[in-house]
Image (spheres, rainbow, N blue to C red):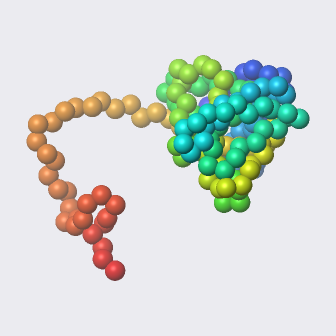
């Protein structure tokens, strides 16, 4: 089943999401940088600075995080969310990830989508207008109801060990 995802360009020079191959599960999202824009950057000590976009580029220093504009507003259909994921190449080659490993955009969000990037290295990373900085995936939302129960659930297996363990020893 094909679902239409409508996209509005906040800036005419914003890049539309791009599917790299017909079998790609996600679509690439690009940075939309305009000269003169000032982006807020937060360092490892939670100090903020303003980074100026010059020549359609901005620098993200080591251990800093930044919201990078995409120039896009997604009209997400009800019953879906848009998930932002890191790009594998940026992660392994440059040490650039999403701050919280994944971004979730709800169908009732109607502002420009920003990508929260984190530079895991000590090197300066330069982001240029049009650089592919994340990938997105349209995901159906599974509705649920939360029901409080008065007794702790009973074990369903003979599993040994707690959080992070399957009970297997080496």
Residue sitting at the far bottom: 170
Q: Quadrant of the C terminus?
A: bottom left
Q: How many marks?
A: 0
Left or right: 104, with 57 as reference point: left
Q: Quadrant of the N terminus?
A: top right
Residue drawn where x is 30% and y is 73% of the image = 168
Residue 90 position within the rendered picture, expressed as x and y whole percent measured from the top left: 70, 53
Residue 29, given in percent of the width and then of the height, sits at: 71, 39
Residue at (10% x, 42% y) in the render:
151
Q: Position of residue 68 (x, y in %)?
A: 69, 34
Q: At 19% from the left edge and 57% from the top edge, which residue is drawn?
A: 156
Camera sees residue 42:
yes
- Residue drawn at x 74%, y 33% is 51
Q: Is residue 43 left or right of residue 160?
A: right
Question: Closer to the camera, 26 or 130?
Answer: 130
Let me know if residue 67 appears in the view. no
116 over 124 or under it: above or below = above
Quarter of the figure with residue 9? top right
> Looking at this view, is 66 or 52 the one in front?
52
Left or right: 130, with 7 as reference point? right
Front-lying residue, 86 or 136: 86
Residue extending farthest right: 55
Q: Quadrant of residue 114?
A: top right
Percent from the top left, x then y, of residue 98? 60, 44
């Amino acid at each position: 089943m094909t679902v239409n995802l409508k996209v509005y360009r906040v800036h005419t020079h914003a890049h539309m999401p791009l599917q790299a191959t017909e079998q790609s599960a996600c679509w690439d999202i690009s940075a939309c940088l305009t000269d003169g824009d000032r982006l807020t950057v937060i360092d490892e000590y939670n100090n903020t600075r303003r980074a100026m976009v010059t020549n359609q580029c901005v620098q993200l220093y080591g251990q800093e995080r930044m919201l990078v504009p995409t120039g896009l507003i997604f009209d997400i259909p009800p019953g879906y969310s848009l998930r932002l994921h890191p790009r594998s190449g940026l992660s392994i080659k440059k040490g650039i990830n999403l701050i919280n490993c994944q971004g979730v955009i709800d169908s009732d969000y109607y502002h420009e989508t920003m990508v929260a990037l984190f530079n895991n290295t000590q090197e300066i990373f330069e982001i240029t207008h049009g650089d592919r900085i994340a990938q997105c995936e349209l995901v159906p939302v599974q509705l649920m109801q939360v029901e409080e129960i008065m007794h702790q659930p009973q074990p369903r297996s003979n599993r040994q060990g707690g959080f992070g363990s399957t009970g297997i020893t080496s």
